[in-house]
Amino acid sequence: MGIGMQIVYLGFPGAAELEAEAGAQLVRLARFGALVSSCHLAIEALRPDRASPHYDVRLDLITPTRELKPIAHCADDNAEAAIRGAFDLAEQELEAIAARARTH
């Protein structure tokens, strides 16, 4: 069974392209399935009334023991770039956790 994901859009209706990007990024975390059972992704348009909104992306990882592991926020004028940034940080965090577990 893979890692589940819930996505919420704040300040805008969302887009299929963003869901596709989030799904592609989630695949990167599949190798950490023993550490993560699901995640919550929030994509917020901070300036939705402007021609070029700014996006804040928050990613929270949920462990198999239901512990919440929040990842630092990522912001960008491009929502897809902010999503990639959040998953980059999550991958780094999970790699560090896995490395610590191997040394103990």
Image: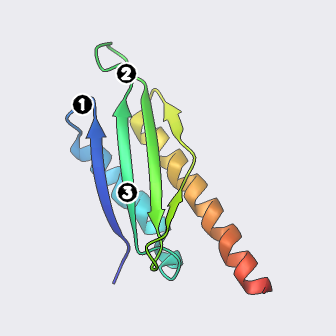
| Mark 1 or 3, nearer chain start | 1
Q: Where is residue 50 shown, x and y percent of the image?
A: 32, 12
At horizontal 46% and vertical 26% (from top left) the residue drawn is 77
At horizontal 40% and vertical 62% (from top left) the residue drawn is 39
The three-letter amino acid code for the residue at tag 3 is: His
The three-letter amino acid code for the residue at tag 2 is: Pro
Q: Considering the image in quadrants, where does the N terminus appear? A: bottom left
The three-letter amino acid code for the residue at tag 1 is: Phe
Callout 3 secondary element: strand
Q: Where is residue 83 shown, x and y percent of the image?
A: 45, 46
Circle 3 sits on which residue? Answer: 40
At horizontal 42% and vertical 67% (from top left) the residue drawn is 27
Circle 1 sits on which residue? Answer: 12
Callout 1 secondary element: loop
Vertical arrangement, residue 88 with respect to residue 73, above or below: below
In the image, which is nearer the foreground, mark 1 or mark 3?
Answer: 3
Circle 2 sits on which residue? Answer: 53
Vertical arrangement, residue 35 with respect to residue 26, above or below: below
